[in-house]
Image (cartoon, rainbow, N blue to C red):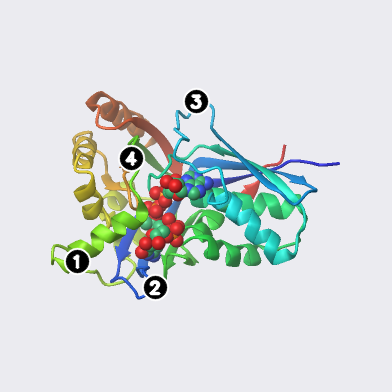
Amino acid sequence: MTRTVRAKAPAKVNLQLTVGPRSEDGYHPLATVFQALDLWEIVEATPRTDGRITLAVDAAAGSLIDTAGVPVDESNLAWRAAELLAESYGIADGVDLRIVKGVPVAGGMAGGSADAAAALVACAEAWDVGASRGALAGLAARLGADVPFSLHGHTAVGMGRGDVLTPAMSHGQFHWVIATQAAGLSTPLVFAEYDRRVDEGAQSPSELAVCTEVMTALMAGDPVALGASLTNDLEAPALALMPRLMQVLEAAEAADACGAIVSGSGPTVVALARSRQHALAIAAHLRAAKVADAVLTASGPAGGTVVIQD
Ligand SMILES: C[C@@](CO)(OP(=O)(O)O)[C@H](O)COP(=O)(O)OP(=O)(O)OC[C@H]1O[C@@H](n2ccc(N)nc2=O)[C@H](O)[C@@H]1O
Ligand SMILES: Nc1ncnc2c1ncn2[C@@H]1O[C@H](COP(=O)(O)OP(=O)(O)O)[C@@H](O)[C@H]1O
């Protein structure tokens, strides 16, 4: 009997995103600290016997996510994940994939990477390939720099392209406000703007070291200290490409957030609150200021990619 397997994978924020000079392969070495948030992508995998892959994409109920920019062909990261898994394990079966998006698209929160991680886990179970978690992590790194963390979840330091992970200690839950923009920012274009700024001397590549203040604040479960330590070398390039993001950062500061930062390559801005109540108050302030197209709240660290048991 054919059964559908469902897996969920978390969104991420970068608490620190330090970028080194562009390498010859076009990638940049990073020192980053990821935290997974409890906004989830769900991927459903239903095996089929004819070897074909099909894909459908829906927004999670009530999420108001616009799925228009998500490809539904073989360029979709979930599709590529299923193909890579099938090739690696000699699977002749196909699969019907359905993505239910709960993470903003092209927002610097790794929604596509979460789909890849969830597709790997759901298809591995649906096809019964017997892949270890370590083997799936190896495939994840081939799909994209952020995909290994989407699989891992929790809090982790990312070195290399961001794909060489070391788990990091963190105490308690942190409460976030997430301000999204309808228009996305392309990750390669933001890195290219970073390169341009470095070439012009507007920005210098930073030393690739993990920030002690971030690690100490995480271990203490201290949002005020963490908020003061947030850094992102892609923030200036993202602001150059989308200047109105400055208004979101200013509105978060006016709402007394512990800190606010562009998430990854943007354009989502995340603001850290002292408590869940404080997050709701900041969210209300940002909505009233009309500086974002949607404002959500979430908390982290959340877990990694898992099969959802019905
Ligand atoms: C910037 C970050 C921060 O976590 O996240 P997002 O803002 O995209 O969510 C990541 O480094 C994005 O990771 P991901 O989106 O998986 O990147 P990939 O698909 O592997 O690469 C897309 C493109 O981004 C650039 N890239 C990515 C990672 C890296 N270390 N150096 C790079 O220069 C390259 O131009 C590459 O062609
Ligand atoms: N499953 C997917 N979900 C979303 N976007 C995808 C997916 N597969 C490929 N993409 C492409 O990747 C781009 C970046 O998507 P996303 O992962 O949501 O943002 P970010 O890299 O900023 O975190 C999208 O604009 C889209 O063209």
- The local secondary structure at tag 1 comes to helix
* 30 over 152 or under it: above or below: below
Measured as percent of width and height from the top left, residue 221 is found at: 39, 51
Query: Label 1, on which residue?
Result: 198
Q: In this rendering, does residue 37 appear at all?
A: no
How far apart in space, not on screen, are marks 3 and 1 (Cα)? 41 Å
Split into 4 quadrants, where in the image is the C terminus? top right
Q: Is mark 1 within 8 Å of ligand 1?
A: no
Q: Nearer the viewer, mark 1 or mark 2?
A: 2
Measured as percent of width and height from the top left, residue 304 is found at: 56, 52
Q: Earlier in the sequence, mark 1 or mark 2?
A: 2
What amino acid type should be assigned to the residue bearing mark 1?
Answer: Val
Q: Nearer the viewer, mark 1 or mark 4?
A: 1
Residue sitting at 28 percent across and 49 percent down? 227
Query: Label 2, on which residue?
Result: 25
What amino acid type should be assigned to the residue bearing mark 2?
Answer: Asp
Residue, far top = 288
- The local secondary structure at tag 3 comes to loop
Q: Earlier in the sequence, mark 2 or mark 4?
A: 2
**Residue 306 relative to residue 200: left or right:** right
Q: Nearer the viewer, mark 3 or mark 4?
A: 3
Residue sitting at 27 percent across and 45 percent down? 260
What is the number of callouts on the image?
Answer: 4
Which image quarter: residue 257? Answer: top left
What amino acid type should be assigned to the residue bearing mark 3?
Answer: Gly
Label placed on residue 274: 4
How far apart in space, not on screen, are marks 3 and 4 (Cα)? 26 Å
What amino acid type should be assigned to the residue bearing mark 4?
Answer: Arg
How far apart in space, not on screen, are marks 1 and 2 (Cα)? 18 Å
**Residue 251 relative to residue 11: left or right:** left
Measured as percent of width and height from the top left, residue 74 is found at: 57, 51
Q: Earlier in the sequence, mark 1 or mark 4?
A: 1
